[in-house]
Amino acid sequence: MRHVLLCSIVASLALCADSSFSQSSWFWQNPSPTGQILNAVSSPDTNTVVAVGPFGTLLRSTDGGLTWKEPVIGTPHHLNGVSFGDAYSGTAVGSYGVILHTTNAGVTWVAQSSGTSEFLNGVCFTDAGTGTVVGSNGIILRTTNGGATWATQSSRTTNSLSSVDFVDANTGTAVGEAGTVLRTTNGGATWTPQSGGTVWPLYGVHLTDDSTGTAVGWGPTGLRSANGLVLRTTDGGTTWAAQNIKSIPLYAVRFSDARTGTAVGASGLNGINGIILHTTDGGLTWTPIDTVSNYVFKAVHFANGRIGWAVGVKGAIFRTTDGGVKWSAQSTLPTSSALYGGCFVDDKTAFAVGNNGALLRTTDGGSTWTRPSGDFGPTEFHAIAFADADSGTAVGNFHGYFRSTDGGASWVWEYNTIMLFANAVCFPSSRVGYMVGNGIAKTTDGGASWIKQSAGPDLAAVCFTDTNTGTAVGYFNMLRTTDGGVNWTEVPGMTNYFLYGVSFTDANTGTAVGSDGTGSCIIRTTDGGATWTNQPSGLPGAPFNSILNAVCFLDANTGIAVGQSSGIGELDIPAGYIISVILRTTNGGSTWAQDPFTSYNELLGVSSLNAHTLMAFGHGGTILRTDNGGLTGIKNSPPFRSASPAQVVLMQNYPNPFNPSTTIRYSLPHRTRVTLGVFNILGQQVALLQNGDQDAGFHEVRFDGSGLASGVYFYRIQAGDFVQTKKLALVK
């Protein structure tokens, strides 16, 4: 056994105090009620509906889906399945063995101990007490006491299981990857493999009686798309008959009665649209009922023979009241195009702009967004700004600009050739404004006319603190003016930066963000741009694809930056996926803290009305809003009761590799003594991050390796009887 040397922490190691998992103050305005993927849906009655998704998303409605609230449930992990056993008892399952349980129809949720850290994908309860959960590596869990205890059952497979369904307490079927089909007739005491006749993944299964069942998934791929696959049995799974549905991968199936069923999934060459299939003959034939642009459906559930819901990507929520013949949207998505930016006019009126002619307007603080009058076509908008309450200018990848003189109710294209495209526009006064792109232009009449000031390099953003003093940033360059643009001076030392955003709070103090080619960058000046210093963002460098796209400072110390990062090493996010990033500083950028809000939509822009009210914009039509300046709260705040983690889980540090700092996260199901240390390859302790009692919850600690050499290190947690070690790499 390797001897571990106890030593004092190197003086230069800066350790942040741990914190419970906190709640973001940013909320969705588009799509609404959420832009997160919804993986599953269940309803104990026709009014109460619960839908779950990634990053701890759990939505609840008590009026049949007309309005939705998001209870605080205390987990950052993905939720993949949900099931109600009666009108009050429900269970949601997810990654890292998370099981949440409610006994009041979803008002509050508490964690249950699953005894596993496997990813849990599907759950089915036949009554309040009896339920089965399936997941990765063939895991099957069973409870007969409402989840007070969960027992592991033998599946005799290591294939991931995606879905499970029971017709009674004893008879059930589970399906998963590689065409796996398992059946039990004794409550899971034994699971018997069945041949579905396919090696393609199966994602959903539903049994209408102990003999009849339907499973759906992916079929053989074609030249440019996958086929949907439907398997049907009428003999308890002894044989399964296959149907291929051309160009439609299917994710879920549900029957409202023995003959009437609905299957949902994707359609189109690239699978970017949603499809709903309907059968009235028990699944012998399937008819496309609806194809919905920009949505992909992941799950479907019926409360009774007529009322049901289908949910999916971009927060899709659709409802039927006639057994699945007709479906209507309960979620709203005025656009799914990338939104690059926006602006406030007042606390009620705001705008957002982006691809495919997306110019949106709200006059009720963002509760609803509509398209104003204007011939926008496929215009790619990049930015919008108002000189006063009536006069607005929108610019983008086209000659000229769009202008409004009626508060944004209508817009007219003003053609000119002063610039091929513009990326940003700002008005430091009601008369004076500037736009930048492949040059710089200025207006002195509120945007009615513009004159070109400079051919200039390609510029991405601009900020003026008064009508004369401004900074423009772009690709490998930064320009400054103090005379209203008569002269623009190039700031030296910018050849290593792709700068996408800039914000000044006065003539001297400013921040620019972007990428330095290896990761995100933040640079700061306090002398009017004469000198700039780098600030640590805390985001990973190459190959993790972190970029900051925009920045907005509310005062000299408080600022928000938004962008993207790769999902490698972050919680349960698949490697290579892009996730959103919101950073906040309260000390002028000396340190930046990452907001707990996360989605799969990169954020591209941010705008503020005042020190409290901001909007962020991004891919998938994302519009987020905060009304407290981006402050975070604690997830066990009233009126909801927080769920405790199900078991001790030590997560992979993020970022990894790192330089110079990284975050280590872990969860505790109950109060216990915790020791967390970092060791070198000789087994010598180089840092002690935690040593003492901690309460139940989600915790994180920052490890700074500035004083250590590059190399492989190990971090080890001991929480009660639980001991686990993981590897991390410091690369300088």
Image (tube, rainbow, N blue to C red):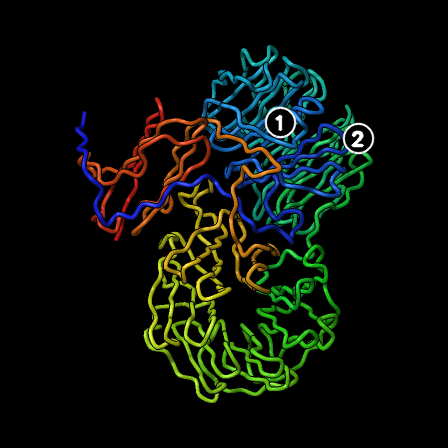
Residue receiving disc 1: 102
State the SS at label 2. loop
> Residue 35: image x %, image y %?
61, 48
Residue 178 seen in this snapshot: no
Q: Residue furthest right?
A: 322
Q: Secondary structure at mark 1?
A: strand
Give the alpha-carbon distance from disc 1 to disc 2, as whole Å: 34 Å
Please tell me which residue is depicted at 33% across the width and 77% down the height of the picture: 492
Question: Of callouts 1 and 2, which one flags the residue occurring earlier in the amino acid sequence?
Answer: 1
Q: Amino acid at mark 2?
A: Thr
Q: In the image, is 323 to the left or to the right of 111?
A: right
Q: Residues within 10 Å of mark 2 (few under 14, many from 20)?
A: some
Taking depth in this image into account, of 521 and 308 the one nearest to the observer is 521
Image quarter of the N terminus? top left
Q: Looking at the image, is 527 positioned above or below residue 578?
A: below
The disc label shown at residue 280, or none: 2
Q: Are marks 1 and 2 in contact (CB under 8 Å)?
A: no
- Position of residue 118 measured from the top left corner of the image (x, y, whole percent): 46, 28
Residue occupying image coordinates x 46% and y 55%? 583
What crowding class fits label 1: few (fewer than 14 Cα within 10 Å), some (14-19), or many (20 or more)? some
Answer with the quarter of the image where residue 256 lies: top right
Q: Which one is nearer the viewer's eye here, 145 or 97?
A: 145
Left or right: where does residue 489 sit relative to residue 248? left
Q: Residue furthest bottom?
A: 486
Residue type at mark 1 is Thr
Q: Residue at x 75, y 29 (%)?
A: 45
